[in-house]
Amino acid sequence: MTYVKTALLWLWLLSKRLYHRPAFVVMLVLIPALVLGYATINTEESGMVTIAVAQEGHSAPDETLLQDLKGDSQLLYYRTCSSPEEARTLVAAGKADTAWIFPQDLEKGIRAFVDAPEENPFIRVLVREDNVMLRLSRERLSGTTYTRVARHAFLVFVRHLAPELSHLSDADLMARYDRVPISENLFTFDESFAAATKTHYLLSPLRGLLGIVVMLCALAAAMYHLRDKQVGTFCRMSLRWRWSAELAGQLVAVCHLTAAAAVCLSLTGLSTGLGRELALTVGYSLCCAAFAMALRRLLGSLRGLAALLPALTVLALVVCPVFFDLADLGPVRLLLPPTYYIYGAHNPTYLWLMPVYAAACFGVYALAGALGRKENR
């Protein structure tokens, strides 16, 4: 019982000491500030591609058509225009990436297109400079208009090739067309570890950014330990057990920030559930603590760790799947803790890999000590 009280007292004193360090307080405040900044982003009026939509002779495009275009996509933002001239002006001014201008009578335009596709295009597309994203956006346009074009094409096909059905009206033919079940999905996509939750693309990097902040906190804690060594804070501890003081200091620091990140993620609706978030908090705290301890012993100086911080931050932003998931960098990104924090949210495999990664880092820590990086008294 005495050992438990002593351990709890140590943890309390280590925690209390942390809040007297301005750098730690700044990083702790940075987590809710970062989440708040992302949460206030207007996710309704944003997209990777801005499309100005107009219809000739109308003050606003057809509402049914707009709803079909929007669907569930968050990558395309449709900006309605009162006239084709307004849409053209937005594209020319760079406020829209492209403009889609529909004819005044959409059904008439579709019928003319079905009769002579090469002579009667019925949608005008304006771009300043074509690129891959705009070409992909036009796939959405063609997919949306396909259903309307297909209905008229069906009528033309039947009237020309089945004259014996001339006694049937267009409504009767379309009723038979609608009764035939047609699957609109040509492909089935199965994403093995993505997402069970719907996340706006502007909020999706939030977990990765918080993970990088926690990793930087672990490196800052490693620098605190080097400073403690210089002033002899733990000189009364034997060299054999001095690693426990470093580990305790690391875990106290990173657990505070990881717990704060879990709370903030739950408030923004990005949490994966209490059980998994708890496992992520514990596992990621161990990963960051072990990673920072290994680097601290390998470098062995405040100057080395301070020089590594900015480079490691940039490397984590590029290599880890924070904004982009670069599959070619797979072996490299597994060397950094944020990868496990990001993937572990939706892939249980990475939850099991977290203790393996932590054990490997502790192994590097012990090996570096055995090869000459001994602790000084």
Image (cartoon, helix red, strand yellow):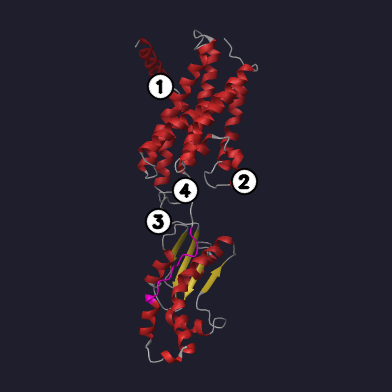
**Which label sits in the foreground, 1 or 4?**
4
The region drawn magenta spans 178-188
Alpha-carbon distance for marks 1 and 4?
36 Å
Q: Which residue is mark 4?
A: 194
Q: Amino acid at mark 1?
A: Ser
Whether residue 256 appears in magenta in the rendering, the answer is: no
Q: How far separated are the C-alphas under marks 3 and 1?
A: 41 Å
Closer to the camera: disc 2 or disc 3?
Answer: 2
Sooner in the amino-acid sequence: mark 2 or mark 4: 4
Tell me which label, 1 or 2, sits earlier in the chain: 1
Question: Which numbered marker is on residue 328?
Answer: 2
User: Which quadrant of the structure image shows residue 226?
Assistant: top right
| Residue for badge 3 | 44
Going from N to C along the chain, the mark reached first, 4 or 3, is 3
Residue located beneath label 1 in the image: 15
Mark 1 nearby-residue class (10 Å; few <14, some 14–19, many ≥20): some
Q: What SS does tag 4 mark?
A: loop
Judge whether 168 appears above or below 92 on screen: below
**Helix, strand or loop under label 3:** loop
SS at badge 1: helix
Q: CA distance from mark 4 to mark 3?
A: 23 Å
